[in-house]
Image (spheres, rainbow, N blue to C red):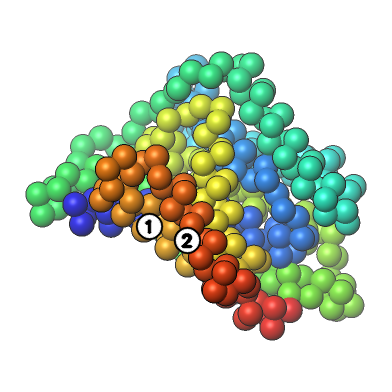
Amino acid sequence: MILDIIISSLINGSVYALLAIGFSLIFGVARIINIAHTAFYMLAAYGIFLGTHRLGINPVLCMLVAIVLVTLIGLISYKLFIDPIREHEAAVLIATIALAMIFQEIMLIIFSGDFRGVPSLVEGYLSIFGVKVSYQQLLTVGVALVVLAGVWVFLMKTKLGLAIRSTANDREGANLMGMNESRVAMITMGVSVGLAAFSGAVVVPLAIVNPFMWMGPLIMMMAAVVLGGLGSIKGSFVGAYILGFAQALVVFLIPMGAYLKGSVALSIMILVLLIRPEGLFGVAFEEER
């Protein structure tokens, strides 16, 4: 059971970290609370299902194409619906909620509400201390961790990553230094949606694809972001794995725990906010700004 909890924690935590970091990036740079963020995760999952089941495309190629297409959809949505009203936070919040619902209804019309599935990329399992761990689970964790490491290198070691972090810390200062804040925001939106799409791609062989699959991850992602400190990349990473571990504990140790995992995650978030309203790393982020 301990190994089951560890594997489940790594899978859930990695997916939530990818989603939460993407969400934090666009919030930090453009102050956008993008409720539609996990809807792009759903679109990628449906794109892979369509490509593998209806069109017969190679699954790996299908995943790459889905990530690119969903990222383009995200950029177009940003330019048409979000950028013109970006300075009005309430309007942006309403617009992203509407965008998520539009994507959901489109998937309902095209695919109906039936549960769908995508076959694993690799079959078989590995026995570790008598516990069967599928190769697909190991692949999902490994690829997610590699991408998270790549995101860290991108943000910390590249000029574009420096521009994103600088704009997130101080938009006015970044503009005074000659950075095109609008362009940086557009690029950040692409990176953010790309991470959401990648999350959908890596988790789809282990998930049930349906038009409402974006809602559960949205709750966990928001909880992770608030737990870590809104806008803090490091906080989003740590918060995601804390919630992933808590969720695994509840599911494996409590009867009917699968129905309580969302409630437990939100309870942890509320408890931390009562003790430390700015989140685990909120103070450091504010000081950096």
Marks counted in the figure total 2
Q: Residue furthest left?
A: 130
Left or right position of 112 against 230: left
Q: Is residue 182 above or below residue 91?
A: below
Image coords of residue 32 (percent x, y): 75, 55
The x, y position of residue 61, in whole percent, is 49, 35
In the figure, residue 152 lies in which quadrant? bottom right
Image vertical order of residue 243 relative to residue 98, above or below? below
Q: Nearer the viewer, mark 2 or mark 1?
A: 2
Name the quarter where the C terminus is drawn: bottom right
For numbered disc 1, what is the local secondary structure? helix
Three-letter residue code for mark 2: Ile
Q: Is residue 82 left or right of residue 193?
A: right
Task: Note whether residue 138 is visible.
Answer: no
> Which residue is at a point 74% across and 42% down the rendered structure image?
96
Return the mark for residue 246. 1
Please tell me which residue lies in front, 224 or 203: 224
Q: Which residue is mark 2?
A: 268
158 vs 249, nearest the viewer: 249
The residue shown at (69%, 83%) is: 287
Q: The residue tagged with tag 2: helix, strand or loop?
A: helix
* In-image side of 231 versus 256 (left or right): right
What is the three-letter code of the residue carrying label 1?
Ala
Q: Residue at x 77, y 70 (%)?
A: 167
- Check the image and report above or below for 278 versus 71: below
- CB under 8 Å between discs 2 and 1: yes
Point 21% across, 37% down: residue? 124
3D distance between C-alphas at marks 2 and 1: 9 Å
Mark 2 surroundings within 10 Å by alpha-carbon count, few (fewer than 14), some (14 through 19), many (20 or more): some
In the image, residue 29 sits, relative to residue 122, either above or below, namely below
Is any part of residue 249 visible from this angle? Answer: yes
